[in-house]
Image: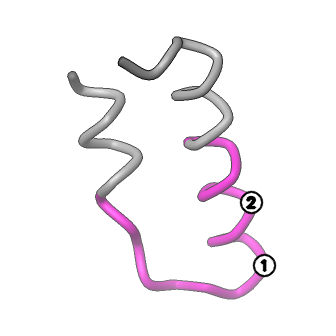
Amino acid sequence: MVPIVGQILLIVFFAIRSDQGDNRFDPVPMAVAAR
């Protein structure tokens, strides 16, 4: 099980990555957060 902090860090990391120009959305963090 991934701790809540880990899930938040994943979401923030992918959000920053998408802001930096990677427009391809990765559904993995949302799937982890929805668990």
18 drawn magenta: yes
3 relative to 19 in the view: left or right: left
Of the 4 image quadrants, the one containing the C terminus is top left
> How dense is the environment of label 2, judged by Cα within 10 Å: few (below 14), some, or many (20 and up)?
few
Q: Residue furthest front?
A: 1
Q: Which residue type carries mark 1?
A: Gln
Left or right: 19, with 32 as reference point: right
Going 24% across and 26% down the picture, which residue do you hit?
34
Determine which residue is flagged by label 1. 20
Q: Position of residue 1 (x, y in %)?
A: 36, 18
User: Which residue is located at x 78 percent, y 78 percent?
Assistant: 20
Vertical arrangement, residue 7 with respect to residue 20, above or below: above
- Furthest toward the top, the residue is 4
- Image quadrant assignment for residue 8: top right
Q: Secondary structure at mark 1?
A: loop
Q: Residue at x 43, y 84 (%)?
A: 24
Tag 2–tag 1 contact (CB < 8 Å)? yes
Stretch in magenta: 11-27
Per the model, the C-alpha gap separating discs 2 and 1 is: 6 Å
Give the quarter of the image for residue 26: bottom left
Give the residue pinned by disc 2: 16
> Residue 23 at x, y = what percent?
52, 84
